[in-house]
Image (cartoon, grey):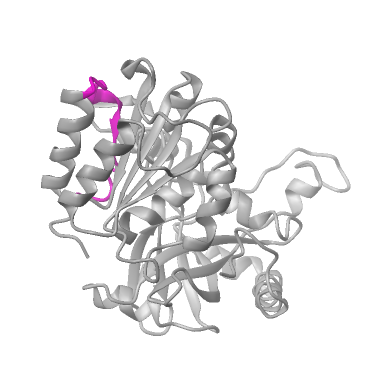
Amino acid sequence: MASIATSAPSARAMLRASALTSRRASSSSSSRARVVSGPRSSPTRRGATAASASAAGDAGAAPESFEGELIANNAASLNGKLRTLVVGVADERGDELLNHRQRTSGTLFKHARWIDAFELPGQYVTITDVDSGKAISKPISVSPYRARSTAPNSDVSVVELLLDTGSDDGDENFFAAAQPPMRLRVSAVKGCGFENPLFPEYCLKSAIERGHAIVCVAGGPRGMGPLRSVIEWPPVSSHAGKNPVTLLYLHAGDSQSAAYVSEWDSWREGGTKVVTSYDDFDAGLFAVRQAIAGGGGGGGNFDRVVGADPKKTTVLMAGLSGDEASALLQIFSTNKKVPKEQILVMPDFALKKKNT
């Protein structure tokens, strides 16, 4: 599966990114001024961020939306049912290359960049088709920093989004079928990533700092999009060499329709245990219990899923219904004594009513 996150961009994709950069460079300063300005989202508390940005004025705030273009629409499953949208976002980099100093006077300066707002997996963006006005909000499925590393000196950042052609959302189906060229508006990066809404101090970053075992539970493609971003986030990749990291992929469909099958082996080689369940949720619960007990295979560096001390375990859940989340809470918190405050979700994406 071709993916900018894991391989060099195709020549055609690079030409599209170059064209986006050229359009950006040819825009006058007055055209940039027409972009509506607002506070940048941050994975710190959103209300506090907005208030501080408002108090500081618009000078350091990022635009609410950026010019974008669809670079590629790649298969994310073997049968092509799931798609990875690769979107280029106009994002100035010239000041960084000059160490944020004016070329002539040496005065320090810094433009707000789109990519600066990405800090944690689980954050999301809204993309809008310029021509039709259709829009969709989706979690980012790989760190934009990793995607950008394929063209580090470009004035284009890259974001990948996982979409399902069989979704019950008409706008998602529209974008899942889209092909380049397509002009887009891309929002600033939004959201706090994975957290416990009642205990915001608990997050993925704090789990890594505390040396926790990390358990990711994905319910279908809706869960795999943001959790792929977790597995491929460099701090988690490094963490997997020293502590248990597990991906439990429930409602995976089958080997042809499951998301990112071609990447599972590399995740396992990197130290992550990958356990899949293709059947209904009851079968998925059995797979979870079996994995916790030390069975079920899945590779990775560690046999165990929950840490030797359950208090040093953090669980991330995405794409699950309320009933499913409750059943998993029973397993991890009630049975295995993982503290409830260390079970994290994405507050910006409510628990869905059913699996799709």
What residue is rendered at 18% in x and 52% in y?
281
Relative image position of residue 261 (x, y in whole percent): 47, 61
Q: Is residue 348 within the magenta segment?
A: yes
Judging depth in this view, the residue of 125 and 227 nearest the camera is 227
Judging depth in this view, the residue of 242 and 6 nearest the camera is 242
| Residue positioned most to the right | 104
- Numbered circles on residues, count: 0
Asked if 161 appears above or below 213 in the picture, the reply is below
Question: Where does the N terminus fall, quadrant-wise?
Answer: bottom right
- Snapshot quadrant of residue 355: bottom left
What residue is rendered at 20% in x and 51% in y?
283
Q: Main secondary structure of the magenta part?
A: loop
Q: Is residue 59 visible?
A: no
Relative image position of residue 175 (x, y in whole percent): 39, 77
Relative image position of residue 41 (x, y in whole percent): 42, 45
What residue is rendered at 33% in x and 66% in y?
254
Question: Where does the C terminus fall, quadrant-wise?
Answer: bottom left
Judging depth in this view, the residue of 30 and 50 nearest the camera is 50
Relative image position of residue 304 (x, y in whole percent): 40, 28
Q: Is residue 6 within the magenta segment?
A: no
Horizontal arrangement in the rendering, residue 351 relative to residue 136 (left or right)? left
- Snapshot quadrant of residue 20: bottom right
Horizontal arrangement in the rendering, residue 345 relative to residue 204 (left or right)? left
* Residue numbers of the magenta segment: 336-351
Horizontal arrangement in the rendering, residue 345 relative to residue 85 (left or right)? left
Q: Is residue 180 visible?
A: yes
